[in-house]
Amino acid sequence: MDTTYPELVGKKVELTYRSNGDVFTETGTVKVANSTGVMFQKGQKSTLILNHEIEDHSIVASTPKASTGVGVKAKRLDPVTDGTVKRHLALHHALLLSEVNNMSVFDALKAHEGQHEEFGADFPHFHAEKNDSGEERQ
């Protein structure tokens, strides 16, 4: 029977082992495994556990990282102008080119303002100029 535990190297493991007559169960990472034992790291502390002391072991299933809770925020864009409103509607409001090309600048500005009013803070962008310090202002 192979008792060198090569399958545990680099894995997070729950080890049950006997030392000085006492039984311990600990969770940590196996850094090295050879014919002598396993180098078991728990936090900053590494311990050599001899192979004959190991009574049981299991690889701990990795759990997905918890969400940081950071959601998607609206992006700041420069204010639209008469010269940029049609391209802005096509790129950022998902209007077709045929739709924006058939609009007057007045209608494009009106459609743009209407979408922002309709969706408010739930819209994925907002318009504001940056002040001299680089901070956003609305």
Image: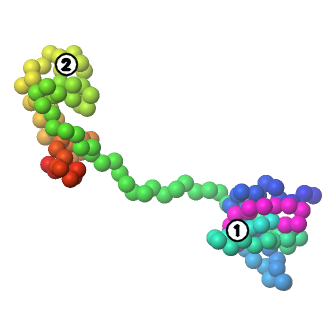
> In the displayed image of the protein, which residue is found farthest to the left?
106
Which amino acid is tagged 2? Glu
Kindly state the secondary structure of the residue where label 2 is placed.
Answer: helix
Q: Quadrant of residue 129?
A: top left
Residue at image x 86%, y 61%?
Answer: 34
Q: Is residue 126 visible?
A: yes
The one nearer the camera, 75 or 25, is 75
As drawn, is 60 to the left or to the right of 85? Answer: right
Horizontal side, residue 31 vs residue 113: left or right: right
Residue named by callout 1: 41
Q: Is residue 119 among what the camera can see? A: no
* Element class at badge 1: strand
Q: Position of residue 103 (x, y in %)?
A: 12, 19
Mark 1 and mark 2 lie on one chain; the one further toward the N terminus is 1
Write down the residue under mark 2.
99
Give the residue drawn at x 12%, y 35%: 113
Q: Residues within 10 Å of mark 2 (few under 14, many from 20)?
A: few
Q: Which portion, as a residue range, is magenta?
A: 26-37
Magenta region includes residue 78: no
- In the image, residue 18 above or below residue 2: below
